[in-house]
Amino acid sequence: MSMPVSSSTLLPLELVDKCIGSRIHIIMKNDKEIVGTLLGFDDFVNMLLEDVTEYRNYSRRQANNKIRSDFAQWK
């Protein structure tokens, strides 16, 4: 059962579009975290960022010995 979309509800791509020019924090499935300013994105949500810092969380990877892909995880 789908929920009706109200005029105040943002669709995912609309939310990403509203973030252009803002500093965003992206959590990747491979225990990487990327922080940067969103300049733009395409229809596949490939993002163009500037002033980027990449962090790796090794403690979480060591605690969980599963193989993970490089695709982004949206939270």
Image (tube, helix red, strand yellow):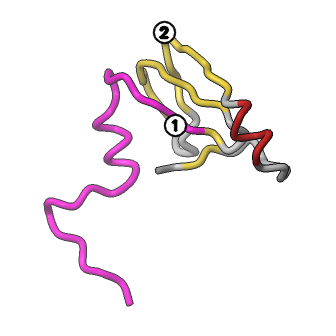
- Foreground of the two, 45 or 36: 36
Q: Nearer the viewer, mark 1 or mark 2?
A: 2
Is 55 on the left-hand or right-hand side of 61? left
Quarter assignment of residue 54: top right
Quarter assignment of residue 3: bottom left
Give the number of the disc on residue 50.
none
Where does label 1 land, which residue? 42
Q: Quick check: 63 above or below 34?
A: below
Is 53 on the left-hand or right-hand side of 19? right
Q: Which residues are magenta?
A: 1-27
Q: Amino acid at mark 1?
A: Asp
Identify the residue at image location x=78%, y=47%. 69
Q: Secondary structure at mark 2?
A: strand
- Please provide percent x and percent y for residue 10: 26, 55
Comes first in the chain, label 1 or label 2: 1
> What is the distance, in whole Å, between disc 1 and disc 2 at their CAs?
19 Å
In reply to whether residue 26 is colored magenta, the answer given is: yes
Identify the residue at image location x=52%, y=34%. 26
Q: How many marks?
A: 2
Q: Amino acid at mark 2?
A: Asp
Q: Quadrant of the N terminus?
A: bottom left
Identify the residue at image location x=46%, y=31%. 25
Give the number of the disc on residue 51.
2
Q: Residues within 10 Å of mark 2 (few under 14, many from 20)?
A: few
Is 56 on the left-hand or right-hand side of 24? right
In reply to whether residue 16 is colored magenta, the answer given is: yes
- Please provide percent x and percent y for residue 15: 32, 46
- Please provide percent x and percent y for residue 56: 67, 26
Query: Can you name the residue that lies furthest to the top here?
Result: 51
Query: Can you name the residue that lies furthest to the left here?
Result: 7
